[in-house]
């Protein structure tokens, strides 16, 4: 068994692996944190969905105007 240890900082929920790790090779990630990680939301789907919408404003929820098909010539 081979092991590799590296330090990384998550950016947009992505951790970059070292260049020596080839594509398609399964590996296991061990995440250790000095500070406690947030706990999963409790209360079911309703609380999860309300947490997603928290902090959104009207501009975030606007849909692009659909012009339909262009006129035929």
Image (cartoon, rainbow, N blue to C red):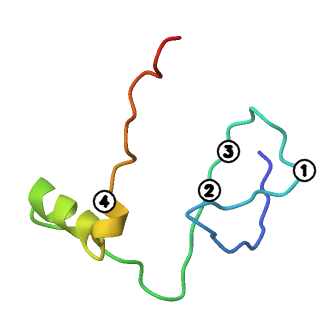
Please say whether residue 69 is visible from this viewpoint.
Answer: yes
Is residue 10 or residue 62 the one in the foreground?
62
> Does residue 5 appear to the left or right of 45 in the view shown?
right
Looking at the image, residue 69 lies above or below residue 25: above
Measure the alpha-carbon separation of dots 1 and 3.
Answer: 12 Å
Measure the alpha-carbon separation of dots 3 and 4.
Answer: 39 Å
Say if mark 3 contacts mark 2, CB within 8 Å.
Answer: yes
Circle 2 sits on which residue?
29
Q: Which SS class for mark 4?
A: helix
Mark 2, Cα crowd under 10 Å, few <14 / some 14-19 / many 20+, is few
Say if mark 4 contacts mark 1, CB within 8 Å.
Answer: no
Q: Nearer the viewer, mark 1 or mark 3?
A: 1
Circle 3 sits on which residue?
27
Measure the alpha-carbon separation of dots 3 and 2.
Answer: 7 Å
> Does residue 17 appear to the left or right of 62 in the view shown?
right
Circle 1 sits on which residue?
20
Residue 4 position in % (x across, y down): 79, 59
Circle 4 sits on which residue?
61
């Amino acid at each position: 068994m081979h092991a590799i240890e590296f330090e990384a900082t998550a950016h947009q929920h992505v951790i970059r692996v070292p260049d020596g790790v080839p594509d398609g090779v399964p590996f296991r990630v061990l995440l250790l944190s000095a500070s406690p990680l947030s706990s999963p939301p409790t209360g079911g789907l309703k609380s999860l969905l309300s947490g997603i919408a928290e902090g959104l404003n009207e501009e975030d929820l606007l849909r692009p105007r659909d012009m339909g098909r262009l006129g035929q010539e």
